[in-house]
Image: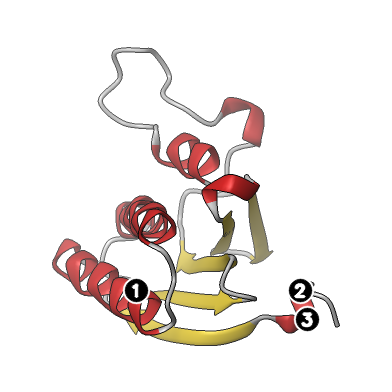
Amino acid sequence: MTGGRRDRRVVLQREYQGVTGTLRAARNDLVDCLEVHGIDQDLRDRAQLVLSELATNAVEASPGSPFVVRLSIGDGRSLVLEVTSRTDAGTPPPREIWGPATSLAARGRGLLIVGSLSAEVDVDQPAAGTVVVKATLRLAAEV
């Protein structure tokens, strides 16, 4: 096998309560795990920001409902970060409208930020009320 998705292994899978107080714990768990696996600082920083945006979206979309963070690492040069959450907001927005409604809007930049920091972002709704956002991040030289 050659660095494909089949070579990835799950190194972190954890459920957090859907409250803002758990966001720091989720970020800390992610960073600790990435450090243990020798992931470089740039990739760790981007992964931490991506998780922060996705976990915040999960908490805001369905306050009080738990969300799950899953991290898979391939060859040390890329990783896949998934956040699975509940939502009452219906289907996720199509990619072409990710971003704030206006340039002065206080909210709405989360998926846009995730998209700019990731090589690939997939948003899936495998069942009604469930959303899975999967971000693939690679070393900066490979993006």
Q: Between disc 1 and disc 3, whose residue precedes?
A: 3
* CA neighbours of label 2 inside 10 A, class few (<14), some (14 to 19), many (20+): few
Image marks 2 and 3: residues in contact by CB distance under 8 Å? no
Check disc 1 and report its element: helix, strand or loop: helix
Q: Which mark is residue 3?
A: 2
Does the CB distance between marks 2 and 1 fall below 8 Å? no
Q: Secondary structure at mark 2?
A: loop
Specify the quadrant that holds the C terminus. top right
Label 1 CA crowd tier, 10 Å (few <14, some 14–19, many 20+): many
Q: How many residues crowd around disc 3 within 10 Å: few (fewer than 14), some, or many (20 or more)?
A: few
Q: In front: mark 2 or mark 1?
A: 2
Q: Is 9 left, or right, of 35 in this rendering?
A: right
Q: CA distance from mark 2 to mark 3?
A: 8 Å
Mark nearest the camera among 2 and 3 is: 2
Q: Looking at the image, which is closer to me, 28 or 123?
A: 28
Q: Amino acid at mark 1?
A: Leu
| Residue kind at label 3, given as amino acid type | Arg
Towards the viewer: 65 or 111: 111
Which label is found at residue 6? Answer: 3
Lateral position of residue 122 relative to residue 80, left or right: right
